[in-house]
Image: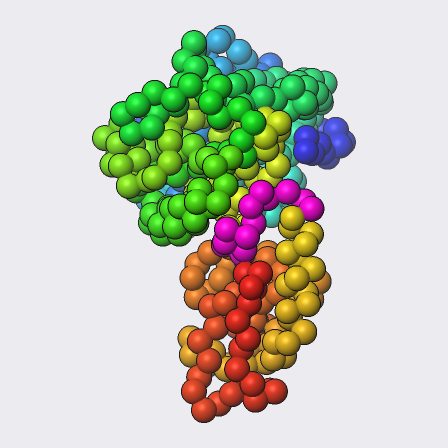
Amino acid sequence: MGSQASSSAASGGGISSILSLGNRDFLISPSGSKVSVEELEGKTIGLYFGANWYAKCEKFTPLLTEVYQKLKEQGTEFEVVFVSCDEDQSSFEQFHGTMPWVAIPFGDLQSRKILNQRYDIEGIPSLVILSPNGQVLQTNGVELIRRYGSQAFPFTPLSIRELIAEEKANQDSQTLEKLLATNGRDYVIDHGKQVPISNLVGKTIGLFFSALSYPPCAKFTSRLASIYRNLREKHDQFEIVFVSVDKDESSYSQSFSEMPWIALPYNVESTKLLSRYFDVQGIPTLIIIGPDGKTITKEGRNLINLHMEMAYPFTEERLKLLREKMDEEAKNYPSSLNHAGHRHALNLVSENSGGGPFICCECDEQGLGWAYQCLGCGYEIHGKCVREVEGKGTSENSPLPKSSSGL
């Protein structure tokens, strides 16, 4: 974490020489008016490379806007400049109109190309942080904003090292009470009842980040609910806590009404803090907290998809045992087969030979380890999702054995 480019990567006489080209000495505001480049001199600059056609940019822009406005309120010398990767002027204007900062004019294609090349932009969204004299401070501004929000400013190597050290100290002293209790609230909600957080201490806890409006959440919630009920019959020291990422309290209530576990009360700020603390970049996400209050894994969703209730208690010792079991079972699997959902034969691959991580093309869930794959098409599925074509058989001419470890 905390990737930095060398200061020589973008030296060149200050901000004006970087943002101006030829006779152009201005930038464009969201309303279309001209803003002198000289107004940005002496400020820390974030060059934001993005496009309206890419969902990750649409998702990151509101987060960057929130941080930008907060830094403005604090009176910091920070400015963002949008470098568009949009396909046409109309798309640029539409996307730029959602932002509160200036942009390189879309018509100045040469400047946009030079900036992309100068900072080796390989993907979007990308946020390159420049010091007031134009030196590169950070090339991974997107990650820093997601992880630390406005605290990332002034983005210097020293300030980022301090944040990393503080983060490690927080993790070392992490307890369940510190994670779940905020602003004097020391309870969670059990469908109308308040449950003291102290009642959860000493248990294995799954923090479930989810939202009603996102279809993959509904699909995984259904699977997780079934596994949760099975686990609760055998292990009363396991609990799940819903952390709502819903946009409003009504959606939160509807989401929670369909869940058999407990939840944090709806609070946007609490969710943001937990999301940043665990670096949650997508939903659904299941974070597993051990009986000692420390994080066991952030890959709870993947482990549930792979191993179902057998993943419990999610410890490295348990996962090692399951991996060994999967490797042993894989010896009895056909090396290739014909799957009803794909026109080509699929080959059995391991984690070391291309089996993960992947998104199963059959169930749309995460996978890792052994899988069936069509390398030419990029098609890959869990072994448990195979639907063999009747009559075609496999290379060994044998049916797919039933897995007991989740392959």
Q: Kindly tell me whether residue 279 is visible in this rendering.
A: no
Residue 330, position in %: x, y?
64, 70
- Number of numbered discs overlaid on the protein picture: 0
| Residue 393 percent coordinates (x, y) | 51, 87
Instruction: Give the residues drawn in magenta, as a range.
Output: 305-317
For image coordinates 48% across by 90% down, the residue present is 392
Give the vertical position of 106 relative to 230 (above or below). above
Q: Confirm whether residue 240 shows in the render.
A: yes
Question: Where is residue 160, by image quadrant?
Answer: top right
Residue under the point 47% across and 68% down: 385
- Whether the magenta-drawn stretch holds residue 314 is answered as yes
Colour scheme used in the picture?
A: rainbow
Quarter containing the N terminus: top right
Q: Which residue corresponds to the image point at 28% horizontal and 41% vertical from the top-left?
A: 258
Residue shown at 33%/40% (left/top)? 259
State the image coordinates of residue 40 (x, y, percent, origin top left): 53, 19
Where, by quadrant of the figure, is residue 151 drawn? top right
Q: Is 12 in front, or is 72? A: 72
Q: Is residue 369 left or right of residue 195?
A: right
Q: In the image, 254: left or right of 35? A: left
Q: Nearer the viewer, residue 174 or 114?
A: 174
Residue 46 location, quadrant: top right
Q: Is residue 41 magenta?
A: no
Viewer-proximal residue among 239 and 113 = 239
**Residue sitting farthest toward the bottom:** 391
Q: Position of residue 239 (x, y in %)?
A: 46, 35
The secondary structure that dominates the magenta segment is helix
Q: Quadrant of the C terminus?
A: bottom right
